[in-house]
Every structure is written in C-alpha cells, then in structure tokens.
Image (cartoon, helix red, strand yellow):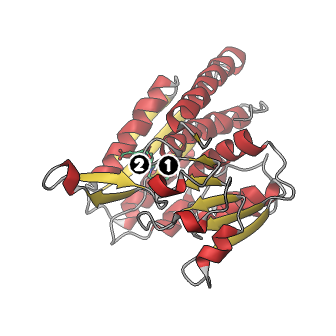
Amino acid sequence: MTTVIDGKQVAASVIEAVKSATQALEADAGVRPGLAVVIVGNDPASHAYVSSKSKMAKECGFQSVQHTLPEDTSQDDLAALVAKLNADASIHGILVQLPLPKHLNSEPIIQSILPEKDVDGLHVVNAGKLATGDLEGGLVSCTPAGAMVFVRQTHGEDLSGLNAVVIGRSNLFGKPMAALLLAANATVTTAHSRTKDLPAVCRNADILVAAVGRPEMVKADWVKPGATVIDVGINRVSAPEKGEGKSKLVGDVAFGEVEKVAGVITPVPGGVGPMTIAMLMANTVIAAYRKAGRKPPRF
Ligand SMILES: Nc1nc2c(c(=O)[nH]1)N[C@@H](CN(C=O)c1ccc(C(=O)N[C@@H](CCC(=O)O)C(=O)O)cc1)CN2
C-alpha cells in the first residue's frame, strides 16, 4: 500500500509546536518573535503566498509586519528597507519574497539581510553552515527543511545506506536539500538538466526528490518500486476537463502513475507546499530564541 503524505496535517502539527514555543519564549524571556515580510510588485501568486505568511505569523502569536512596495521600487530603496529591518530589534526574521521584478537584483538584497535574521536560509553564511554540516548554528531554507520533515518521518534520523536523488540544483531548494540528505548520511546524487540518462539515475533512488519546475516529468518507470517520492514542483497547467479556460496545479511527478509504484509519495497541492510556510514560522521562532540567548527547540 502506498502512503500519500498529508502535508497540510504535518504542517499543522509544526504550527502547533511553533505556537507553544512562542508562548514559552514570551513567558520565559518576555520576547515576542517578529517577522517582516517584504513584497515588491504585483505578481498575484507572490501576493497570495505573502498574505498567507503574514496571516500565519499572526496566528502563531508573532509581531507580523508586511511591507508592500510598488513594481517600480529601486534597488536602493529596497536595500534601505532591508537595512532598516536589520537595525530593528523587534524584528527577528526578514523575508524578501521571490521572484523580485526583473529590474531588481535579488542576490545583493538577500546577502544584505543579517544572517541571524535570514529566515529564508539563503544568506551565504547560512548556506555555508549547512554545506559544512552545521545544522544547529544557522537557518535552513524553508522548503527543503519541510521536505526533510517528511523524510525523517518515513526513514528516521539516519539515512545510512539509502540512495537519495535530488533533481534540481537551485539555491532555494536543490542544493540545501542535497546538503540536508548528506548530513543525515544518505548517499546523494544531485541531477539536473545536463545529467545523462536521468531516468536511470532516478531508478537508483530510495528517496527521490523532484524540483525542476517541469509538469509531471517524473514517470512511473523512473521510480524504484517502494521508493519515497517527494514532489516539490508547483506547476499551473490548463485543465480543459474542468471547463474552458480552467487550470490546475500539478507537480513535477506524474502522480497518478507514480503512486502505483512508490512506497511513499507527496501530492501537489497539499504536500511540500504547506510545509514552506510552517518552516518559515519555525525559523522565525528559532531566530527569536537565539536572540534571547535561549536554546531553540527542534522542529
Ligand atoms: N523568499 C521566498 N520566496 C519564495 C519561496 C520561499 O521559500 N522564499 N518559495 C516559493 C513560494 N512559496 C513561498 O514563498 C510557497 C509556494 C507554495 C506554497 C503552497 O502552500 N502551495 C500549495 C498550493 C497553493 C496554491 O493553490 O496555489 C500546495 O502546494 O499545496 C506555499 C508557499 C517561491 N518564492
């Protein structure tokens, strides 16, 4: 029997743990976690994600601040806002929603966030800590941290002897996911658009993680029977079966056929996606604990 992971349910249990940790920190140190979310421009999907983040931060008991900047915001104005948030002692986490409008360069903006407030885990200091196996000292990118919760629930803490394949090598997901799997002792292959015979590489995986942004690319005959398949893709495709002009979300995995082969699989929607926001809340509470000189809980 294949297990279909319920990402909403797992995310809800992370959120409950974040709420308890927030209450404990306020009671113990008088500190309320503060999260600032910055969005530039008019992208509707980004606005939906940001309003979910701000709403969830409030639900967790945080001080939640949202900065909505116009499409024509300059690089200097955005940098000035980040500098202001860096200097604000009531803000423990800063997140700049990606992608930014095309005229802005995201890299210097991300690198200007103080590493201890970089709740997206994208600063080179946090990426470097993860790459060197320091999982306690830094902040880990939210989507891979969430995917890793599923992996731990399925296989436990120690992945010794298991082959893991991550398809995709982005800084936001593929590289940190590979580093997390390696830190848990898996034998890790990072595959990408230049990988030769990708289906054969994937068939070797006990844990297969797809993050390429190509709708339903991973087919049943790419998957080892019984493997754990984590789908990170979120692709909007047309769905004429739902009516003219209608669309639906699909992952990078052809769920209908892969479900019959995999041992464990995440759906899209309702798999890794909800964990992204839950782990952002977890990172914010971790940052607040550290600022207060307290040992943060593990999520
Ligand atoms: N600064 C960042 N920007 C972006 C990140 C990020 O982690 N940091 N990730 C994505 C977008 N994202 C959060 O920002 C995100 C994507 C998807 C979901 C989610 O819950 N998806 C649902 C489906 C939602 C829908 O119906 O459209 C699901 O998969 O079930 C949450 C957050 C890019 N930008």
Q: Is residue 204 visible?
A: yes
Q: Which residue is the site of mark 2? A: 38
* Residue 165: x %, y % from top left: 68, 66
Q: Which quadrant of the rendered structure holds the C terminus?
A: top right
Q: Which residue is the site of mark 1? A: 95
* 2 or 1: tag closer to the N-terminus: 2
- Which amino acid does the dot numbered 1 rest on? Leu
* Residue 136: x %, y % from top left: 79, 46
Q: Residue at x 70, y 21 (%)?
A: 29
Q: Which quadrant of the rendered structure holds the N terminus?
A: top right
Q: Residue at x 66, y 24 (%)?
A: 21
In this rendering, position of residue 10 left or right of residue 254: right
Instruction: Say which element carries label 1.
Output: strand
Give the image quarter of residue 286: top right
- Which amino acid does the dot numbered 2 rest on? Val
Instruction: Say which element carries label 2.
Output: strand
Please determine whether, in this image, residue 191 is positioned above or below residue 153: below
Q: Residue at x 43, y 58 (%)?
A: 98
| Contact (Cβ within 8 Å) of mark 2 with mark 1 | yes
Q: Residue at x 51, y 53 (%)?
A: 83
Q: Is mark 2 within 8 Å of ligand 1?
A: no
